Amino acid sequence: MIRLADVYYLTGAMFAGFALLSLRDRANRKRFGNTAFWGLLAVSFLFGSRLGDLANGLLVIALVLLGGTRAMGVGAPKSTTQGERDARAKRWGNTIFLPALLIPVLTVAGTLTLGRISIGGAPIADPQQVTLISLALAIGVAFVVAMARFRPPAVAGVDEGRRLADMIGWAIILPQMLAALGAVFALAGVGGIVGRIATTWLPLGHPFAAVAAYCIGMALFTMVMGNAFAAFPVMTAAIGVPLIVHRFGGDPAIMGAIGMLSGFCGTLATPMAANFNIVPAALLELPDRNAVIKVQIPTGIALLVCNIVLMYALVYRFR
Amino acid sequence: MNYWPLLGIAALVAGFALRANPLIVILVCALVTGVAAGIAPLHLIAALGHAFNQSRYVSIVWLILPVIGLLEREGLQERARILVGRIKAATAGRIILIYLALRQITAALGLTSLGGPAQMVRPLVAPMAEGAAESRLGPIPDEVRYTVRAYAASADNVGAFFGEDIFIAIASILLIKAFLAQSGFDIPPFKLSMWAIPTALLAFAIHGVRLWRLDARLERMAQRGRVARERPP
């Protein structure tokens, strides 16, 4: 059976490859910084489960110091020139899209099947993690197809990956860092404190005020935490259930559904939701790392207003 | 009640406002929050390490980098531009609008893994939209290029966020159900999904209208860029 741990080993091997090739890249003045960063990340993926929490914590601090202090540069792997790319785009035709399209299609196909097909009594993939395993397998198939079709030098796969990884740089670990911060917030009871403040300071004597405070609270708290899932239990326990449902007689299903979507409006507007907002900016080589957020804020605000109106119109009517 | 842990959030907001490196800001925020809550430093570092290790799954998507890199080396983005350049009706706004619709519909069917910034936006949607902008406006200034890319990424997010809750087995629906069950309300997931539909339609309308008007905006931007270039120094 393929487990998530196997996918971690593969990811670790990739980062180890980035580290090795960075070390040989004399064009990059800061190549030792890159080698250390990708190397530590490889250690995390290869041995993280055996290191123990404290060692992992120290590894995180080392990664943050390397990534946060401009210790990394951008490597210069040997790639093709613009002219070569234009020529090859004509030569390969639309078949070049095949590997790219294989990834989403095979991921979905794998998700639907791999957990259910079993060989010798055990399913092919751990049913709990089937989407992530399918994604990794789909990427593997696409990689093999691309290598077979284009026949680049053997090292090109890792080197081209390193080119992109160096471009994204420290932002690669941002989503994991935010997850770690969420754990500290939970340990410190930040959610409870915010809920307490919301209920003490806000005027919630009217059904509309309760709806507005709940939706805006979901959006703002999501912006701070970077994740609507963290905000939902806090705001729903503080305002949603006691006021909207119990005191004013609202419908819990409508409150929950639109409340969560109000949180998503906050997700559109915060750098804390790094994998949705900051990572794409890095991936698309945008000089302003908040460029995606800036484009999303008008939609987020308009939709939050819509959610408040919708919830007020529906939650007290359908029960 | 001890309100001091909120100092961490203050540090977070200040750090982002000062445009410090987010990794450093987050680490400082975590340390301040933990210390203010009276958590022992070593325990705090261990908690950080544990959570970082447990959330490695979010980084699996980076396995895609070698594949995208290989395809780009062979001219993927150039081919995407050639392809849309041949379609006369293709504009940046319309391409991103179509992607928004596809993303939202597939997410509503539970197929969120069909899209994503690394899987779809960087290799396909962004170069196609840029290609369409180029074939309509000629050589485009960087400002236009970056705006097109940012909108392509935004469509991926808006479509996923406001489509996925229509699917009954998505994590957020299950979280709502589990939490409300703890509070004494047994609600079928189907009912939660149904009430996500009005917001989904409004999200498509709002972001769709903005994408519909994007082409005119890009044209104005490109013109301004040309005027600025032609003006003598």
Image: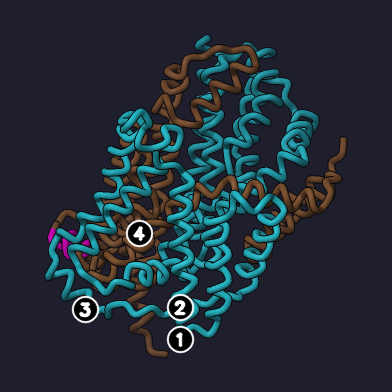
Chain on which label 2 sits: A
Q: CA distance from mark 4 to mark 3?
A: 20 Å
Residue indicated by mark 1: A27
Q: Is residue A270 magenta?
A: no
Q: Are marks 4 and 1 on the same chain?
A: no
Q: Nearer the viewer, mark 4 or mark 2?
A: 2
- Classify mark 4: residues with Cα within 10 Å, few (<14), some (14-19) or many (20+): many
**What x and y, as percent, mark residue B93?**
30, 53
* The C terminus of chain B - image quarter: bottom left
Does the residue at mark 1 contact the one at mark 2 (Cβ under 8 Å)? yes
Vertical placement of residue B108 versus A143, above or below: above
Does the residue at mark 4 contact the one at mark 1 (Cβ under 8 Å)? no
In the image, what residue occupies the spot 43% across and 23% down? Answer: B193
**What x and y, as percent, mark residue A288?**
51, 66
Residue indicated by mark 2: A75
For the residue marked with disc 1, what is the amino acid?
Ala
For the residue marked with disc 4, what is the amino acid?
Arg
For the residue marked with disc 3, what is the amino acid?
Glu
Find residue A33 and report its image quarter.
Answer: bottom right
Q: Nearer the viewer, mark 1 or mark 3?
A: 1
From the image, state the color of chain A: cyan
Q: CA distance from mark 4 to mark 1?
A: 26 Å
Residue indicated by mark 3: A84
Q: CA distance from mark 1 to mark 2?
A: 7 Å
Report the magenta residues as a range. B80-86
Numbered mark located on residue B122 in the image: 4
Q: Nearer the viewer, mark 3 or mark 2?
A: 2
